[in-house]
Image (cartoon, rainbow, N blue to C red):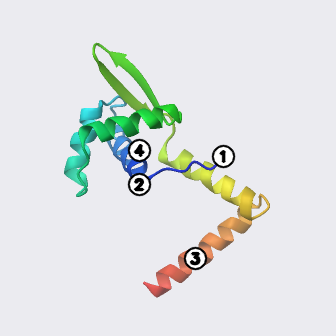
Amino acid sequence: MLSKHGILESAILNVLWDLESEGIYTHSVKDVYDAMGKNYTDKRAYTTIKTVMDRLHEKKLLLRYKQGRKFYYRTTMSNREIIINSLNEIASRYCNGDIVRLSQILNSVTETYLVGA
């Protein structure tokens, strides 16, 4: 099923992928909150970040574990894996499962966008 993510959910996933790219795979809500404060102009409350991270855990996009009194999170899928899954679902829904056809459409869109840019 094509995962639908809100803007904040996607932003949190992107922050976590950036943090994980540094080789550390467990982060607290505070880590994400601090990173978002540095990289995003739209400041969100700590409690909002926590709530959305809990929702991402419920959607099985984040693993969560407790250490002491604090929860830590890590992503269950890479950015690449989510994109591949989404593209496969789009191909299934709109191209009769033909990923090559979807690729041709994407190439056409990309060429149009690059020429128009």
| Residue annotated with mark 3 | 109
* Residue furthest out toward the top: 68
Whichever of callouts 1 and 3 sits on the residue coming sooner in the sequence is 1
Left or right, 42 with respect to 82, comes to left
Whichever of callouts 4 and 3 sits on the residue coming sooner in the sequence is 4
- Secondary structure beneath label 4: helix
- Secondary structure beneath label 1: loop
Q: Which mark is residue 7?
A: 2
- Whether tag 2 and tag 3 are in contact, CB under 8 A, the answer is no
Q: Quadrant of the C terminus?
A: bottom left
| Eye-nearest disc, 2 or 4 | 2
Pick the front one: 73 or 107 = 73
Residue 90 location in percent, x, y? 67, 58
Category of crowding for the residue at label 3, using alpha-carbon neighbours closer than 10 angstroms: few (below 14), some (14–19), many (at least 20)? few
The quadrant where residue 92 appears: bottom right
| Residue annotated with mark 1 | 1
Amino acid on which the number 2 mark rests in the picture:
Ile
- Secondary structure beneath label 3: helix
| Residue annotated with mark 4 | 13
Category of crowding for the residue at label 1, using alpha-carbon neighbours closer than 10 angstroms: few (below 14), some (14–19), many (at least 20)? few
* Residue 97 in sight in this render: yes
**Residue at x-position 51% and y-position 39%:** 77
Vertical order, 61 against 65 (above or below): below
Left or right, 86 with respect to 10, comes to right
